[in-house]
Image: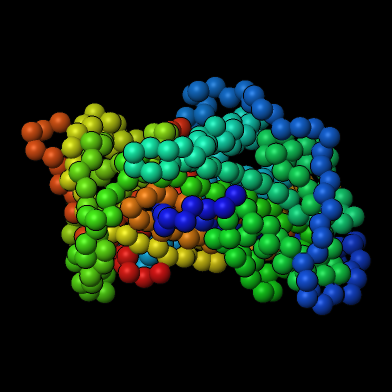
């Protein structure tokens, strides 16, 4: 699908986790190809189809959403220790890709992954909950329709895929989980003969699924002849604001960036929206067309950014959202336009710091629920994201790949002037955080 010609708020994020086989494994390597062109991937699937009506109670799904949000906040704090740079990521994309990896983890590897990823539900509920989230996100789509403010629409696509070495043996039950709970087919590549051609094939798929916003997710050298599996997730979102900003109202304004004051285009408008405030922060919601998705902006007070960032949890956000929902009044806004790319970033070190260590080490890694030789470990996890905000709305895309190698109401409106570093999340009606970022300098692209 072609994108609208208008500029918009764009959020592509990509995570790649690669799994490799340990040196000395029983698989024999063949000579490496030139890698000059992408490979044509064959596809193999489990005979089972996606479960389009997963059984997950409302209470379990609420726990699942809260757990994933807490993981997102923890990961954000690992990759963004200070408010000196722009940061943008998709916790949902990272979580989905690593959940597909977790489905094959066993023993201490599984325990460490569950702790780091905040997976508290049993796997019999966890994986169907990811399926339920994907189905709910698919239901948010709204076809292009005309309004007094111009054409509006919502497009939200979450896609998963597994890229396996031709001839490599995987546990059938694991492939069933990929098919039933993640609707993920298995595409066959020959990493052993042509690792770079395989890398290009995966990068081309990510590029296509993210509407060409995420290119070259997997960097040079990230795939080699020991790679046996790459698990990818893409999350693409495009949405117009429920109430667009008047372009004639946009004017230059001062933004107090970390490196000093700068002039940036500031959008202005008064909205009847949710608003909350607390000790050292203000917050407001900007809903998208259909009112099932929204961008929540959190503006810390001067010199309080680190403090507010440290408070972020799922429970904190739920409380602030409840306060916003109770207000629903006029808010006078000044919000900068911005766009930037974050990544490709390796998430290996942040995930290790969160306690997920064995998964990255051979022979400590135990993915015997995935393949019978117990020789796979995660070689790296990559993430990349792009975001851009303007008067019309949002376009967002996220992708995640895991690469595995063989190892060895007041009278007056509230006023919010977003003229200093701030945080923002894009949330689904389920409460799930799809994207999360901080803007330290809106002029940086």
Question: Can I make out residue 226 in this image?
Answer: no
Q: Residue 359 occupies which quadrant of the picture?
A: bottom right
Q: At x 34% / y 35%, what residue is drawn?
A: 318
Q: x, y (%) of residue 335?
A: 26, 55
Q: x, y (%) of residue 203?
A: 67, 63
Q: Is residue 430 above or below residue 279?
A: above
Viewport quadrant of the C terminus: bottom left
Q: How is the image coloured?
A: rainbow
Q: Nearer the viewer, residue 367 or 346?
A: 346
- Is 253 on the left or on the right of 336, as rendered? left
Q: x, y (%) of residue 401?
A: 64, 56
- Is 133 on the left or on the right of 377, as rendered? left
Q: Which residue occupies the extreme left position in the image? A: 411
Q: Nearer the viewer, residue 391 or 132?
A: 391
Q: At x 49% / y 40%, what residue is drawn?
A: 144
Q: Residue 402 occupies which quadrant of the picture?
A: bottom right
Q: x, y (%) of residue 355?
A: 54, 54
Count of numbered badges drawn on the protein: 0
Q: Is residue 217 above or below residue 335?
A: below
Question: Can I make out residue 272 in this image?
Answer: yes
- Is 326 on the left or on the right of 382, as rendered? left
Q: At x 17% / y 45%, what residue is drawn?
A: 332
Q: At x 70% / y 49%, what residue is drawn?
A: 161
């Amino acid at each position: 699908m072609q994108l609208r010609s208008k500029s918009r708020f764009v959020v592509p994020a990509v995570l790649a986790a690669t799994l490799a086989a340990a040196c000395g494994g029983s698989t024999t390597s063949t000579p490496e190809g030139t890698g000059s062109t992408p490979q044509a991937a064959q596809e193999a699937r489990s005979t089972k189809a996606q479960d389009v009506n997963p059984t997950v109670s409302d209470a379990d799904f609420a726990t699942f959403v809260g757990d994933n949000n807490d993981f997102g906040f923890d990961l954000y704090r690992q990759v963004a220790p200070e408010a000196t740079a722009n940061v943008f990521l998709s916790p949902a994309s990272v979580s989905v890709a690593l959940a597909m990896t977790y489905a094959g983890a066993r023993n201490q590897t599984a325990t460490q992954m569950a702790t780091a990823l905040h997976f508290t539900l049993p796997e019999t509920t966890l994986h169907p909950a990811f399926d339920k989230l994907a189905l709910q996100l698919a239901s948010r789509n709204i076809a292009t329709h005309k309004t007094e403010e111009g054409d509006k629409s919502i497009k939200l696509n979450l896609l998963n895929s597994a890229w396996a070495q031709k001839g490599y043996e995987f546990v059938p039950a694991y492939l069933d989980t990929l098919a039933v709970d993640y609707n993920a087919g298995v595409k066959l590549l020959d990493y052993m003969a042509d690792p770079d051609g395989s890398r290009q094939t995966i990068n081309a798929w990510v590029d296509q699924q993210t509407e060409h916003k995420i290119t070259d997710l997997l960097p040079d050298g990230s795939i080699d002849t020991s790679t046996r599996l790459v698990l990818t997730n893409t999350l693409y979102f495009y949405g117009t604001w429920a109430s667009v900003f008047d372009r004639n109202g946009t004017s230059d304004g001062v933004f107090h960036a970390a490196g000093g004051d700068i002039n940036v285009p500031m959008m202005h408008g008064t909205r009847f929206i949710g608003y909350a405030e607390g000790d050292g922060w203000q917050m407001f919601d900007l809903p998208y067309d259909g009112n099932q998705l929204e961008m929540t902006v959190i503006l810390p007070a001067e010199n309080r950014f680190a403090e507010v960032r440290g408070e972020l949890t799922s429970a904190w956000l739920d409380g602030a959202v409840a306060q916003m929902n109770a207000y629903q009044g006029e808010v006078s806004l000044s919000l900068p336009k911005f766009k930037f790319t974050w990544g490709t970033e390796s998430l290996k070190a942040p995930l290790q710091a969160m306690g997920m260590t064995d998964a990255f080490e051979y022979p400590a890694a135990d993915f015997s629920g995935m393949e019978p030789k117990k020789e796979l470990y995660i070689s790296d996890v990559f993430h990349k994201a792009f975001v851009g905000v303007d008067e019309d709305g949002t376009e967002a895309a996220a992708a995640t790949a895991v690469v595995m190698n063989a190892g060895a109401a007041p009278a007056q409106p509230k006023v919010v002037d977003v003229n200093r570093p701030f945080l923002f999340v894009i949330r689904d009606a389920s409460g799930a955080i799809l994207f999360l970022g901080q803007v330290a300098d809106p002029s940086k692209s």
